[in-house]
Amino acid sequence: MVVEKDLEAALDQVRADAAGPVAGVFGPSSVTWQIDREAVIFLGAGRALLLQLAHPWVAAAIAEHSRTLADPIGRFHRTFDIVFAMVFGSLDRALLSSRQLHRRHSMIVGEMPETVGPFAAGSRYCANDIPSLRWVHATLVETGLMAHDLVLPQLSAEERERYWTESRLFGALFGLTGDDLPTDWSGFAAYTAAMAQSDTLTVSAAARDIATQIFDGARPWLRPPRWYRALTASLLPERLRAGFGFELDARDIRAADNALKWIRRVYPRLPDRLRDVGPYQEAQARLRGEPRPDWMTRCLNRAWIGRPQMDQRR
């Protein structure tokens, strides 16, 4: 388990390797900024969530401690607020988000309500458990790149290695050390492939219920469109797709294919002001010495993180 002293030791390494106090952990020349700046990464948000839910501890924790179902938009904003602050925030803001996340996780403990996969009923779970953190981290890293490569030119082998090196630093913001993570991209790919086949990922009743309420819930105005649901399902490993009860018919597949064709045609032609997420635009303004993002960036920030300025402390 990652305790406070472990986190602080990991953050010492982040400070040592960071791009700078203003540029933050990664900075504008990083592959991480190249990927995470793109609004198209939202195509993978559903996949990342479902892969996290497929871990029985994560599903139990969300079912018992999260407001996801009562406030799905708030959950979206809180998640992206933390991730984007780590990626695009100043160094101080990234470290603050890391500590906030750790404190929040330290309160998420409980017992498994039923036996799921290798996790026995009554066994204890905690959100700061290293294997669980490693998996959540992996879903964000892998899915971000997958969503990027669905629409934009794929990274080269060298760029993927750089991306993974940077992602190990991203992992340190969760309290994960170099020993907790694979050393290179091939090791990371082997880890995610093994997890996809392992019963460590077993879709529980709680996970299915959460997924059903998100993708087929009673609030039509929040329900993802058919094409997004189909695309999300198609990006999952087959056994997990079946575990969540996703059945894709010809109409579903056609909807996802048509949407993806349209996005691939239109998205690369959009101006950067529409393609780039608000927190990235705020980071660029910060690097230019501007004390406050402009009105358009503030509007985009409200859409992505639920507030107008990322670097403002809460």
Image (cartoon, helix red, strand yellow):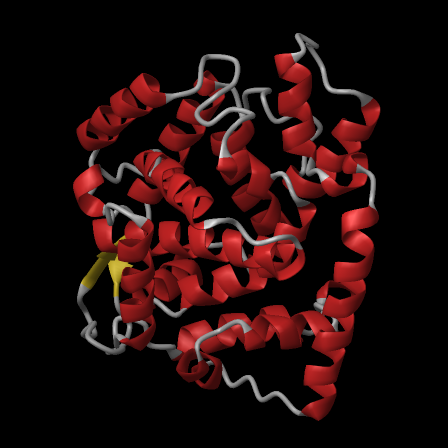
Percent of width and height locating residue 78 = 55, 42
- Closer to the camera, 276 or 97? 276
The answer, for residue 226, to whether it is visible in the render is no
Tell me the quarter of the picture where residue 216 sits.
Answer: bottom right
Residue at image x 79%, y 33%?
299
Percent of width and height locating residue 262 = 81, 65
Q: Is residue 200 above or below residue 44?
A: below
Q: Is residue 277 above or below residue 126?
A: above
Percent of width and height locating residue 114 = 27, 77
The quadrant the N terminus occupies is: top left
Residue at image x 18%, y 74%?
120
Left or right of 312? Residue 124 is: left
Outermost residue on the bottom side: it is 249
Q: Is residue 39 above or below residue 96?
A: below
Left or right of 230? Residue 97 is: left
The answer, for residue 190, to whether it is visible in the render is yes
Left or right of 186? Residue 159 is: right
- Closer to the camera, 105 or 279? 279
Tell me the quarter of the picture where residue 8 sits.
Answer: top left
